[in-house]
Image (cartoon, rainbow, N blue to C red):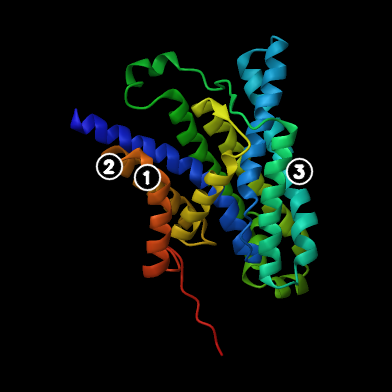
Amino acid sequence: MEFDFFLELFLGGLTRGSIYALIALGYTMVYGIIQLINFAHGEIYMIGAFTGLIVSSVLTMTGLPQLAVVIIAASAAILYSCCYGYTMEKIAYKPLRNAPRLSALISAIGMSLFLQNYVLLAQTSDFLPFPSLIPDFEFWEPYSHIITSPELVILITTVIVMILLTFLIKFTTVGKAMRATSQDSTMAALLGINVNRIISITFVLGSATAAIGGLLIASHIGQINFYMGFIAGIKAFVAAVLGGIGSIPGAVLGSLVLGWTESFFTGYISSDYEDVFAFLFLVLILIFRPSGILGRSETQKV
C-alpha cells in the first residue's frame, strides 16, 4: 500500500512536471534569444485552453467523431495561440528591442494583465467545464490504477514535443539561426540572418507548446477559467529558473523536479501549502545556485 501511494505521487509529479515543461520551454527559448522574461506566456497557455473549449463545443454539436473533434480543436488552439504569440511580440516587445530591459519587463507584465482581463470580459470569471478530449483506452484498463489514460497521453505528448523541438534546434537551418541569434544577435545579423524573423519564430514555437499544455491539462482536470494561466505560468517560470533559464534541457529537468517536489510535499505533508513549496524552491535555488541546475554562471569583464 505504501509503495502504491509512492508510485501514485511519483507519476502525479511526472504528469505535473510534464505540463510545466511545455510552458517552461517557451520561457527559456525566449530568454535564450532576447534575454526577456515573457510573463504573458502563461496567458497564451490559458487562451489555448479556451480556444480548444470553444471549438470542441461547436464541433461536438455537429456530430463529428471524437477523434476528428480532438484533432480540429487542437489544431485550432495551437494556430490561434501562435497568432497571439506572434502579434504580442510585434506589438509589445519589438518596439522595445533596444530599450532598457526594465521597459520590456513592464510591457510583459502589462500584456499578462491585459490578456487576463480581455478573456475575463469576453468569457466569464466562473470556472467552465472542459470536456474530456482523451478517452479511456480499453486495453489500458488493467493498469488504470497506476496511471490513467489522460496522464499517459500527457507524458507521451510531452516526450514527442521535446524530441521534435530538440531536433529542430540542433539539426535544422532555423535551429542553427536561433542558436546563432542567441549567442550574438548583432553578428548573426551581419552574417545575413533575419534576427526579427527568428525572434518571431521563437515566440510562435513557445506559444504552440503552451497551447498544447493548456489543452492537455484542461482536458485532464475538466475545468478552466481566465486565471488558470497566471499560476501555471509563474510555476513554469520557477521551473525554468530552477533548471537554468535559457537551457532547454534545464527547463525540462527543472519542471520535473518541481512537479515531483510539489507532489511529494502535498502527499506527505499538506496540499494547503502546494504553492508555498514551489516558491520556497525558487528562493532556495536563487540563494544557493542562481544560475540553476544546468545553468552556467557568466563572468562579466569590467
**Of callouts 2 and 3, the N-terminal one:** 3
Percent x, y of residue 130 = 58, 24
The crowd level at tag 3 (other Cα within 10 Å; few <14, some 14-19, many 20+) is: some
The residue indicated by pointer 2 is: 269
Looking at the rendered structure, the kind of residue marked 2 is Ile
Relative vertical location of residue 63 with respect to residue 140 in this rendering, above or below: above
Provide the secondary structure element on which disc 3 rests: helix
* Cα distance between the residues tagged 2 and 3: 42 Å
* Residue 260 horizontal side relative to residue 163, left or right: left
Name the kind of residue labelled 1 in the image: Tyr
| CB-based contact (under 8 Å), mark 1 and mark 3 | no
Q: Is residue 166 visible?
A: no
Query: Element at badge 1?
Result: helix
Q: Residue 135 location in percent, x, y?
A: 51, 18
Give the spatial CA distance, label 2 vs label 1. Answer: 9 Å
Q: Looking at this view, name the residue that lies furthest to the bottom.
A: 302
Whether pointer 2 and pointer 1 mark residues with C-beta atoms closer than 8 Å, the reply is: yes
Q: Earlier in the sequence, mark 1 or mark 3?
A: 3
